Image (cartoon, helix red, strand yellow):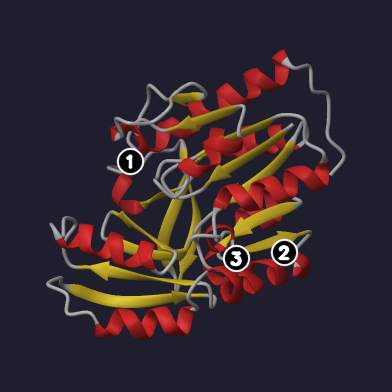
């Protein structure tokens, strides 16, 4: 069994989601001595337990550098694989999977406009949108940090522009992502599942960038506070939503996975 989970706003939460100090919560990420992200202590313990019973794969849109700030994964959870850059890179036992990296980068020439070219075209657009900054992620995609959370009608125009160039545009909070169509979380998860011959796949995530994983999953679990819960035209056959929201949804997600493990009588997975 394989369990692949998004991190931010699914298992890990930033300071703005923590209303007050709580002894059940622990700090899991810092940057320049600044506190960044937190997890429930109970979620950490459940992840440790799960990692002895199945193949746990963290999946994130974070860059390599951002992912590596999460020392708790490296030192305590110790996953065999980790998917970063929205599926653009895979770590196996701490090293980048060069086979996957070559496969992803080869598709830029074959299937879509390259990163340099799409950035150039984007800069030519006359946008009625207030952009605070633009960030590029490991030579794979880029995103804009906006001053406002609702940029209005310009989104439709940008969606069509991205689609024409075989890229995908997704708004998540104040971050406006532009990602190649072939750089997706579900493709990276499927690649690992095939290598490990996983017979059952459970995934979880909160955002539109996570929902593609539902297409390859027996069960997809989403926290009730996420973007996915607000979608109307989705197939919810294999989708479960938590009753809890915020950081406490992480415990509920992991309890659901543990229940599946027990029902399937999974004893252990040699990692």
Location of residue 69 (image quadrant): bottom right
Viewer-closest of 224 and 251: 224
Q: Which residue is mark 2?
A: 100
* Label 1 crowd bin: few (<14), some (14–19), many (20+), radius 10 Å: some
In this picture, residue 199 sits left or right of residue 129: right
Residue for point 53% across, 58% down: 86
Tell which circle, 1 or 2, labels the residue nearer the N-terminal end.
2
Q: Which residue is mark 3?
A: 68
- Asked whether the residues under the numbered discs 3 and 2 touch, taking CB atoms below 8 Å apart as contact, a structural biologist would say no
State the image coordinates of residue 164 (x, y, percent, origin top left): 37, 66
81 versus 166 height, above or below: above
Tell which circle, 1 or 3, labels the residue nearer the N-terminal end.
3
Marks 1 and 2, how far apart at CA: 29 Å
Residue for point 59% across, 64% down: 88
Q: Marks 1 and 2: which is nearer the front?
A: 2
In this picture, residue 218 sits left or right of residue 61: right
State the image coordinates of residue 239 (x, y, percent, origin top left): 48, 26
Q: Quadrant of the C terminus?
A: top right
Q: Which residue is mark 1?
A: 227
Residue for point 28% across, 34% down: 230
Marks 3 and 2, how far apart at CA: 19 Å
Viewer-closest of 35 and 128: 128
Describe the element under mark 1 as helix, strand or loop.
loop
Residue for point 70% across, 33% down: 50
* Label 3 crowd bin: few (<14), some (14–19), many (20+), radius 10 Å: some
């Amino acid at each position: 069994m394989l369990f692949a989970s998004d991190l931010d706003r699914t298992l890990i939460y930033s300071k703005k989601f923590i209303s007050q100090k709580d002894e059940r919560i622990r700090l899991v990420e810092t940057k320049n001595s600044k506190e960044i992200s937190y997890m429930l202590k109970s979620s950490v313990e459940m992840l440790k337990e799960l990692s002895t019973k199945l193949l746990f794969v963290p999946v994130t849109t974070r860059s390599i550098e951002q992912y590596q700030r999460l020392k708790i994964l490296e030192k305590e959870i110790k996953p065999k694989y980790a998917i970063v850059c929205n599926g653009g890179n895979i770590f196996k036992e701490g090293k980048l999977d060069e086979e996957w990296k070559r496969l992803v980068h080869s598709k830029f020439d074959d299937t879509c406009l390259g990163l340099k070219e799409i950035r150039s075209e984007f800069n030519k657009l006359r946008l009625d949108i207030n952009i605070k900054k633009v960030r590029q992620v490991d030579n794979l995609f880029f995103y804009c940090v906006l001053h406002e959370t609702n940029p209005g009608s310009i989104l439709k125009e940008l969606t069509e522009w991205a689609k024409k160039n075989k890229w995908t545009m997704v708004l998540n909070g104040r971050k406006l992502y532009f990602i190649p169509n072939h750089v997706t979380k579900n493709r990276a998860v499927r690649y690992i599942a095939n290598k490990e011959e996983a017979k059952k796949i459970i995934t979880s995530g909160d955002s539109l960038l996570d929902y593609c994983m539902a297409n390859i999953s027996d069960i997809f679990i989403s926290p009730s506070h996420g973007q996915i819960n607000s979608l109307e035209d989705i197939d919810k056959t294999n989708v479960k939503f938590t009753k809890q929201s915020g950081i406490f949804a992480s415990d509920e997600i992991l309890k659901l996975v543990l229940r599946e493990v027990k029902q399937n009588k999974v004893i252990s997975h040699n990692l």
